[in-house]
């Protein structure tokens, strides 16, 4: 109720979910009410002076083309780490691999290195208890904030914290706070030229915005893409042929090869079309009475844009439920019908980074390993609970190092 409204910055063509009322838990979670930070990212935070400044820092400094380039090495190291671990386990024979736990460290470590300049536990971050606990906090927070909260509709039940979601969020906040505070203390003495402006809370808010917004979204997209490829071995083969032709199997694929691997980008887009990691984007709230796509939207209404429904709408997509990366080969600007990163001034500032991380990881997994389904049955594609639409069941696949790549993989 106390959340200041944010401007509706989004042009929309349909599939709106308009909610008038106190449905504020998700915005509160993301805007720092539960996390007690000065300000935080996400669409529900007012586009005021402070957030404008944060967006400026993100877009121009952290995610600018030049800055992303300076972090190429970080992404290279983390993808190499993933490939090396996998190679160690499946050098000779096919083994069963649970993909989620292997992939989730990748975007997490990359973003942590970008925002903190280091991993708190050096090279062993993936085995660190506190890092793993923090990853668990992110997972739980997404699951909790994606759950239906009866209290949103029957506010009286708040008195007894029906479902206990509020208690759970406070507990998550404490864990999150401990982790980030420790990280800040490790980094603070080295940098921060304006300690009065960049207080601990401001820094923690930003770190959390990036870690929350950028980790599960990217790793879930890689997991969905691998699931779709296992169900469509012809697409997998076509992608591998593209990579082999370009690298001539003489070297491992690099992130800088991505512009020359258009089919990989088509696979990423098609995955984001069918399984957008933020299916309802992020809630927006109107500051004035307005009309969108013929709907009267009263001031203070929370608007959810159902990107998932738009992406699967047979009126705007041919054969929308089928996985066909080729559809992106012929397309130019997709306009409002393809909006996995939102649109307008609150669109995802991390889309460039996400495309690089997801594309590079996928290209490397495809180039270096043979992939098969565990049995005859297709990989299940049902969605689980949570804000980022994770897979219901973590992906398990059969994986074996490609013979023709072994000499390169051994040198990693
Ligand atoms: C596949 C990966 C990703 C997807 C699908 C995705 C999608 C989205 C969407 C739909 C929004 C809301 C846009 C809107 O409300 O109109 C958003 C916001 C945001 N994303 Fe991403 N994102 C991804 C990766 C990332 C990464 C890697 C980062 C940064 C490390 C990031 C940082 C953010 C931030 C900070 C916001 C809030 C922006 C604001 O409120 O002004 N995202 N993202």
Image (tube, rainbow, N blue to C red):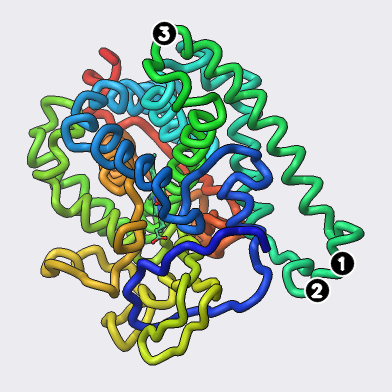
Relative depth, front residue between 160 and 2: 2
Q: Dot 2 corresponds to which residue?
A: 154
- Mark 1 and 3 residues: CB-CB less than 8 Å, in contact? no
Q: Residue at x 41, y 35 (%)?
A: 107
- Mark 2 and 1 residues: CB-CB less than 8 Å, in contact? yes
Q: Residue furthest right?
A: 160
Residue 287, given in percent of the width and then of the height, sits at 47, 70
Q: Earlier in the sequence, mark 3 or mark 2?
A: 2
Q: How crowded is mark 2: few (under 14 residues within 10 Å), some or many (20 or more)?
A: few
Q: How far apart are marks 3 and 2 (CA)?
A: 49 Å
Q: How many labels does the image show?
A: 3
Q: Which residue is drawn at 31% across and 22% down?
A: 74
Q: What element carries label 3?
A: loop
Q: In this view, does 53 lie above or below 412?
A: below
Can residue 151 be seen at all in this image of the molecule?
Answer: yes
Residue 89, given in percent of the width and then of the height, sits at 46, 24
Relative depth, front residue between 176 and 329: 176
Q: Which residue is drawn at 21% across and 24% down?
A: 70
Q: Dot 1 corresponds to which residue?
A: 157
Q: Earlier in the sequence, mark 1 or mark 3?
A: 1
Q: Is mark 2 on a helix, strand or loop?
A: loop
Q: Which residue is drawn at 31% across and 58% down?
A: 345
Q: In this view, does 289 lie above or below 124?
A: below
Hey, which quadrant is residue 116 in on the image? top left
Residue 301, given in percent of the width and then of the height, sits at 54, 75
Ligand 1 contact, mark 2 (Cβ < 8 Å): no
Q: Residues within 10 Å of mark 1 (few under 14, many from 20)?
A: few
Q: Dot 3 corresponds to which residue?
A: 190
């Amino acid at each position: 109720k106390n959340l200041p409204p944010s401007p509706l910055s989004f042009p929309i063509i349909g599939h709106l979910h308009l909610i008038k009322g106190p449905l504020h838990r998700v915005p509160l979670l993301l805007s720092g009410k539960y996390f007690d930070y000065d300000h935080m990212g996400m669409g529900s935070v007012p586009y005021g002076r402070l957030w404008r400044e944060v967006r400026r820092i993100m877009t121009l400094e952290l995610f600018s083309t030049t800055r992303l380039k300076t972090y190429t090495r970080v992404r290279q190291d983390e993808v190499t780490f993933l490939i090396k671990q996998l190679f160690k386990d499946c050098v000779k024979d096919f083994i069963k691999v649970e993909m989620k736990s292997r992939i989730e460290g990748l975007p997490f470590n990359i973003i942590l290195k970008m925002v903190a300049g280091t991993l708190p536990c050096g090279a062993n971050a993936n085995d660190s208890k506190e890092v793993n606990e923090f990853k668990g906090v992110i997972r739980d927070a997404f699951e909790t904030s994606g759950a239906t909260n009866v209290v949103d509709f029957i506010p009286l039940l708040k008195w007894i914290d029906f479902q206990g979601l509020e208690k759970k969020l406070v507990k998550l906040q404490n864990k999150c706070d401990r982790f980030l505070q420790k990280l800040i203390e490790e980094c603070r003495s080295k940098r921060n030229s304006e300690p009065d402006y960049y207080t601990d809370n401001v820094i923690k808010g930003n770190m959390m915005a990036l870690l929350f917004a950028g980790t599960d979204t990217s790793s879930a997209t890689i997991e969905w893409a691998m699931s779709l490829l296992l169900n469509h071995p012809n697409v997998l083969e076509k992608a591998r042929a593209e990579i082999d032709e370009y690298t001539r199997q003489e070297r491992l694929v690099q992130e800088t090869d991505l512009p020359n691997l258009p089919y990989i980008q088509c696979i990423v887009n098609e995955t984001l079309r069918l399984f957008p990691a933020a299916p309802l984007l992020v809630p927006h709230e109107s500051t004035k009475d307005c009309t969108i796509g013929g709907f009267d939207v009263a001031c203070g209404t929370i608007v959810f844009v159902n990107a998932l429904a738009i992406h699967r709408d047979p009126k705007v997509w041919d054969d929308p439920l089928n996985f066909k990366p080729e559809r992106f080969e012929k397309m130019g600007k997709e306009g409002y019908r393809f909006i996995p990163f939102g649109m307008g001034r609150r669109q995802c500032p991390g889309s460039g980074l996400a495309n690089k991380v997801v594309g590079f990881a996928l290209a490397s997994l495809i180039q270096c390993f043979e992939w098969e389904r565990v049995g005859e049955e297709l990989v299940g594609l049902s969605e689980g609970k949570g804000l980022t639409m994770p897979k219901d069941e973590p992906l398990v696949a059969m994986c074996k190092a490609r013979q023709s790549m072994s000499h390169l993989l051994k040198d990693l």
